Image (tube, rainbow, N blue to C red):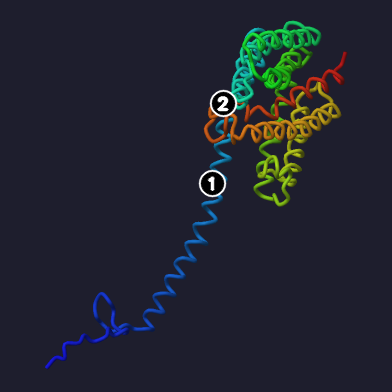
Amino acid sequence: MSSGRRRPPDPRRSRSSGRPRDPDRDRDRDRERRRERARERSSEGKPRRQRGRSSELLLRVLVAIPLAVLVIVFVEAGGIAFALFVIVVGWLCMYELYRMLDRWKPLPIVGFAALAGMVLAGVYGGQRQVAEVAMATLPVLFLLTVARGERQPTISIAGTLLGVYWIGFAFAHAGLLRELPHGNAVIIDVLIGTFIGDTGAYLGGRLFGRRPLAPSISPNKTVEGLACGMIAAVVAVFLAGLYQPWLTQGDALLLGIAVAVLGPIGDLFESVIKRDAGTKDAGTLFGPHGGVLDRADAALFTLVAGYYVWLAVMPH
């Protein structure tokens, strides 16, 4: 007769089938699972990271190629077509900046007008006319700020002038450089050096980066990436100069060094602004690559440097 009590489960039996468990078979099964996980980590993990890096680099190139073609077309065209193109690009950069600094209550209309006037002064005038437009901006900005009744007019004026003197002056210098002898080619040389330097810094940081360059400003930048980018920029401008008989090797080297030094500074400058504004990217026009200002930050410094270097060394 049954005593009415249930027998304790036999630990050797499987819960699903009730058959006795085989310890050796279980160990083999666990061992095989561990081997499968190890194979997955070794065969999939590293290539996925490499594919991610390759796809990111490919996307950079795919974004840069049509932009480069567009820039070359307008640089070679010169005149009003070049001026209007520079003004539009400058306005996009300035719009992204003022949107980041929205809490400072800048006056975008003043910045846009100043940039357009400075670019036109650079293309059709000279340094004096650019300076006159820039200086005339201050009293106009003051009067409009007071008329708007800002509670903190100093901050509003400062935010607006940041766009004028950072972005406006840079694009005005692009106009000044375009009007110098061989200025169109120098602009292209500078932009090539800037792009190659930026790409070299990206690849160098990915491959060799160990020591952070400025962790409080841009944690992903490394000293090794900076060195690779600077070397790439100098070499790119120097090689471009070999196909331009009017540009001596010494002048090309000097121009390349200026691009190599000023490009990273321009990049870090924008990083400071973005960090202070609490944003990762200035805009979204280029998707994961940010906005126009994110693509032009280094060029805003290298174009100015290129103008003064070429102005100093060009044949008179």
Q: Look at the numbered discs 1 and 2 and tell me whether their residues touch, using CB distance below 8 Å.
A: no
Please state the total of marks drawn on the protein image.
2
Q: Which quadrant of the figure has residue 134?
A: top right
In the image, residue 105 sits, relative to residue 14, either above or below, namely: above
Residue 81 or residue 115, whichever sits in front: 115
Q: Is residue 15 left or right of residue 98?
A: left
Taking the view exactly as shown, the residue that stands out farthest to the bottom is: 1
Q: Residues within 10 Å of mark 1 (few under 14, many from 20)?
A: few
Q: Earlier in the sequence, mark 1 or mark 2?
A: 1
| Amino acid, disc 2 | Pro
- Give the image location of residue 144, x and y in percent: 66, 9
Q: Quadrant of residue 253?
A: top right
Quarter occupied by residue 93? top right
What is the x, y in percent for residue 110? 65, 12
- Would you say 177 lies left or right of 84 here? right
Given the image, on which type of amino acid does mark 1 rest?
A: Gly
Q: Nearer the viewer, residue 218 or 263?
A: 218
Give the secondary structure at mark 2. helix
Residue found 73% across the figure and 6% down from its top = 124
> Quarter holding the N terminus?
bottom left
Q: Tell me where residue 55 appears, x and y as whole percent.
A: 53, 42
| SS assignment at label 1 | helix
Per the image, the residue denoted by label 2 is: 66
Q: How packed is label 2: few (under 14 Cα within 10 Å), some, or many (20 or more)?
A: few
Establish if 231 lies above or below 6.
Answer: above
Q: Name the residue rendered at 76%, 13% in the picture.
A: 176
| Residue 280 place in picture, x, y as percent | 59, 36
Residue annotated with mark 1: 52
In the rendered image, the residue lying farthest to the left is 1
Q: Between label 1 and label 2, give the one nearer the viewer.
A: 1
Q: Residue at x 77, y 22 (%)?
A: 304
